[in-house]
Image: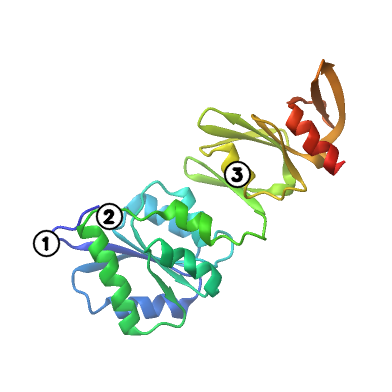
Amino acid sequence: MKQRQGERLKAVIVDDEDLARSIVREYLSGFHDIDIVADCANGFEAVKAITELSPDLLFLDIQMPKLNGFEVLELVQHKPAVIFVTAFDQYALKAFEVHAVDYLLKPFTRDRFDQALALAREQLRRRKSQPLAEVIAAARKKDIPLERVLVRDGSKVHVIPVEKIDYIEAQDDYIAIKTEGKTHLKQQRLAELENLLEPRRFVRIHRSFILNIERLARIELYAKDSRVAILKDGTKLQVSRAGFDKLKELL
């Protein structure tokens, strides 16, 4: 979204700490062309506010319970100019610096706040979109596997613990997550999710399937050099040669 001269900007503040939100509100009070349209204490409130209000600016805490900042961005289609507010370590902060997305490291000063806001304004003026997907992927801890998968269904958000996933199937531009007898569709590439899951538990057994090996009952020969995985509930999934080799290493 491009800011036109004289146009007012809508801002949303998201942080689970009251003090942190009050500081951002105080620092923004000196900018008369910015309206704070929502003040959110958790990620679910943030998803609702961003979806309904389409803000220009988003001050977003990362480390929050229920939904963290990265998960909030994953669930919303509208992408405002984001200033991350974080207590992240220096390793993760490099991701923001490399991609020229600004952040405020708690505790931050008014001068540092003003610098971040100036960069966000410049991005809005130039219609320069932030590479948020790349930032999120780079900032995630590489040694900490994904613990839950989020799926948005209209106004609802399904939070699926990974241990409850049976298997995941690729379906064109979507993935179908099979869990507890239900199927949840999510717009994501199978390879992207594979990179975030615990490799000792979730195995890419075929170009179309990722299997939670705790659900595996047995492997059967289907035809020459062709096998199927039989799950504990009786579901049958095709296993490629490479997938079978991966399974042999783990079983």
Neighbourhood count class around disc 2 (C-alpha, 10 Å): few under 14, some 14–19, many 20 upward: few
- Which label was assigned to residue 128? 2
Viewer-nearest residue: 46 or 144: 144
Q: Residue 113 at x, y = what percent? A: 33, 78
Kind of residue sitting beneath label 2: Lys
N-terminal of the pair, mark 3 or mark 1, is 1
Q: Is residue 148 left or right of residue 76?
A: right
Q: For the point 84% across and 43% down, which residue is it? A: 250
Q: CA distance from mark 1 to mark 2?
A: 16 Å
Of the 4 image quadrants, the one containing the C terminus is: top right
Neighbourhood count class around disc 3 (C-alpha, 10 Å): few under 14, some 14–19, many 20 upward: some
- The kind of secondary structure element at disc 3 is helix
Q: Residue 175 at x, y = what percent? A: 58, 34
92 lies above or below 212: below
Please give the residue where the numbered disc 1 appears in the rendered image: 5
Please give the residue where the numbered disc 3 appears in the rendered image: 193
Q: Residue 186: name its quadrant.
A: top right
Q: Residue 129 at x, y = what percent? A: 31, 53
